[in-house]
Amino acid sequence: MTKVVIVKANSYDTQVVEQVMQDLLAHLGGIERYINAGERVLVKPNMLEAVDKASGVTTHPEVVRAVVRMVKSAGAIPVVGDSPGVGNLRKVAEKCGIWQVCQEEGVLLVSFNEIAELALPEGILLKKLNVANVVTEVDKVISLAKMKTHSFMGVTGAVKNLFGLFVGTDKAQFHLRMKHRTDFARMLVDLYRAIKPVLSIVDGITGMEGAGPRNGQVVRSGVLLAGSCGFSVDLVMADIMGFDAEQMPVAQAALAAGLSPALAAIDRVGSGKDEHLHFKEPRNFDSLERKLPGWLVDFSQNQFTAKPLIDRACIGCGRCAEHCPPKAIRIIQGKAVIDYRECIRCYCCQELCPADAVSLSDGRLLRLVKWLRER
Ligand code: SF4
Ligand code: SF4
């Protein structure tokens, strides 16, 4: 039976987090079960963008520290790296505190610039992937995610965290190529299979609800999760958040491919095994779209999915225009303007807007269906 450990933790105090991390790993048989002496280990936190560690957007630096120390305790050599959605890695790491932890712990922070091709003949959608070449230079990878809602994927945890292994503009290309949640989720399942992280750990001491992964509200969720199967860790995480975990797109894709156990088949252990929280769903995330055939979603995408709206808080910074995969946004007279004929509803603009100026409005059919359901 696949095991997921959930341990309660209410503080980012260095000693507390280190103790909790040891507790997590003890439940999983100890770090030596996963990491051998002398191995190089990539620790991959969520470093979405340059924001304060208290924002709930990025993996907390003290959790990174605890994992780095744990890897060292096995006699291995940790390196920390990510490819942020916005901004350069050094700036992002400095702002969220991970740079300082790397300095204090004598650990290399690696930028993902070079690309390596990984073959995945058994992939559902992708038979080969171009990812940061650092994954070919290390022996093991640890996914060190943040517990958050996600406008497009419902939740983001250990599996979605690996999306940061795609370098630079490759991320936008995936949004363009995989416009539907189901395809995007299958791509993430392929990515997970190609990377095969040896451990998946989620920082849920604080999490994010609502308009995640960037503009939601911080929740004091008080848990850390870990396991050797990222799909299982994310299923349990989504369940603890109060969502229909098996209906999350990545869970659906992994279950359909026979790569994930059912939620009921996962053995939960640890002081937080009975935790049940009530995170607010992302505004546009509705299970209906996930139950429809792809052709119907394609035909009526704009009606079944929420539309991004730019409000008065827009400061015209241009970040959304720069990162919009189909280039559907222009800055006109200091404000972002969306061409909805081009918009693919990926919500990158909402995810990356520093002014929280992008809200989501349900399409007409979606509004009608929700109204019918409530009657
Ligand atoms: S919507 Fe947000 S990201 Fe886009 S220009 Fe306005 S403030 Fe910048
Ligand atoms: S306007 Fe926003 S939601 Fe639409 S394609 Fe661009 S980034 Fe994605």
Image (cartoon, helix red, strand yellow):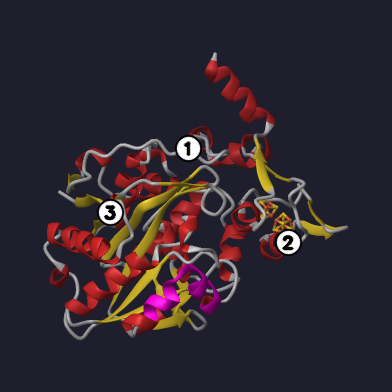
- Viewed as shown, does residue 264 lie left or right of 330? left
In this view of the protein, can residue 259 be seen by the observer?
A: no
Labels 3, 2: front one: 3
Task: Check residue 225 in the rendering and tell me which mark sits there, or answer none.
Answer: 3
- Magenta stretch: dominant secondary structure: helix
Query: Closer to the camera: disc 1 or disc 2?
Result: 1
- The answer to whether mark 1 is within 8 Å of ligand 2 is no
* Horizontal side, residue 268 vs residue 9: left or right: left
User: Which residue is at the front of the view, 88 or 369?
Assistant: 88
Residue 222 x %, y %: 32, 48
Q: Position of residue 326 (x, y in %)?
A: 70, 59
**Of the image marks 3 and 2, the number of the one nearer the N terminus:** 3
Q: Position of residue 345 (x, y in %)?
A: 64, 48
Instruction: Give the magenta-colored segment's residue range.
Output: 90-102
Q: Residues within 10 Å of mark 2 (few under 14, many from 20)?
A: many
Q: Residue at x 88, y 58 (%)?
A: 333
* Residue located beneath label 2 in the image: 321
Residue 187 at x, y percent in the picture:
46, 58
- Relative to residue 347, is residue 12 depicted above or below? below
In-image side of 235 versus 176 (left or right): left
Amino acid type for the residue under numbered disc 1: Lys
Amino acid under disc 2? Ala
Check residue 157 for magenta coloring: no
Residues at marks 1 and 2, CA–CA distance in whole angstroms: 28 Å
Decide if ligand 1 comes within 8 Å of the CB at mark 2. Answer: yes
Asked if marks 1 and 3 touch (Cβ < 8 Å), the reply is no
Compared with 109, 266 (above or below) is above
Q: Relative to 73, is 201 above or below? A: above
Judging by the rendered image, the residue that carries numbered circle 1 is 280
Task: Give the label on residue 254, or none.
Answer: none
User: Identity of the amino acid at label 3?
Assistant: Leu
